Amino acid sequence: MSILHFCQVIQQMRFATALRESTLMFPILEGTHLLGLALMMAPVAMLDMRLLGILWKDEPATKIRNQFLPITFAGFAVMITTGLLLFWSEAVKCWSSKYFRFKLILLVLAGLNALLFHSTVDRKIKLWENHPVPPSRARFAGAMSLALWTLIIATGRYTAYNL
Amino acid sequence: MNLLPFFKWCDQSWMGEAIRSVTWAFPLIETIHILAMTVLLGGILMMDLRLLGAAERLLPVSKIQKQLTRYIDVSLVLIIVTGVLLFSSEAVKAYDNAAFFPKMYLLAAAVIYHYTVHRRAVTADNPSGPRWARPAAALSLALWFGVGICGRAIGFV
């Protein structure tokens, strides 16, 4: 079964069809996905800006992480839930868009970036938490995170266009 | 006051024509509009979650405000500029759209509120804001998310 076939099958399911053809549910779902961006991105950006040594330079990096990272879980939950439902209801259209497929790759990269950061540089965070400008590996993780998420948002928007 | 002639004029402006004639212009401007929205709404959310007591209490709200205020100001300018450009490319459609005017009213209210009452709340000496922090934050979020919801609704009504 090809991926396209899989998309056709799941989007023909009753729930997916109901969602796709709904007057209110789909707009609400899409609107929540869009506005949820703020909830997800902002706390991530707060930590990234600290890792880059651009904002919060006089605060320990651990404090910034502990202040903002808990919020990201709520943000990710909203984005993943709404995202999956949106995909399910329009699987074929999404998969047919090269921007969407690129977005999926970027999402994986963003996840890998976070994983890499947490398993390496973050382990030694106590060593540099008070440095206004953290070591280069941490700065790289922050820059990659911001760049990837910005591209993810852009490709998400472009999915609707057939450019 | 009949605004339709003004909207028609906007539609026919060189700006509106330019954006309509270049296929990739509208999507690009719209994407910048959304990225600006993420910064604007996100920054305000960081302060309001703190005021609501829904976030950790490690940082005083005035500190969050101080670090983010410039980014919020710039993203507000950017979102308005891109908004005007988007509007000029389909002004008459906007005029007839049920969500457009509500969005503009809410935007005006949100901006005024943000730079007056809300500013007082987030620059308070108390790290968790004044006694009226919670309703102040709730109103802020209602106004700004109201703008966002109307903005999305433009595509559906």
Image (tube, rainbow, N blue to C red):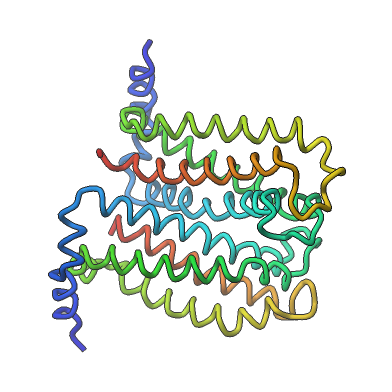
Q: Position of residue B127 (x, y in %)?
A: 79, 72
Callout count: 0
Residue that lies at the very extreme toward the right in this rendered image: A126
Q: B51 or A22: nearer the eye?
A: B51
Q: Residue at x 27, y 66 (%)?
A: B87
In the figure, is residue A161 to the left or right of A32? left
Q: Is B40 situated left or right of A26 in this image?
A: right
Rendered image quadrant of residue A119: top right
Q: Quadrant of residue B104?
A: bottom left
User: x%, y% of residue A140?
Assistant: 64, 40
Q: In the rendered view, would you say A101 is above or below A71?
A: above
Which residue does the image show at 46% across and 60% down from the upper left? B36
Q: Quadrant of the N terminus of chain B?
A: bottom left
- Considering depth in this image, is B57 or A6 the residue closer to the camera? B57
Q: Residue at x 56, y 46 (%)?
A: A146
Q: Please tell me whether residue A26 is drawn above or below residue A137 in the rendered image.
A: below
For image coordinates 75% across by 43% down, the residue present is A135
In the image, A117 versus A18, the foreground residue is A117
Q: Position of residue B33 (x, y in %)?
A: 39, 59
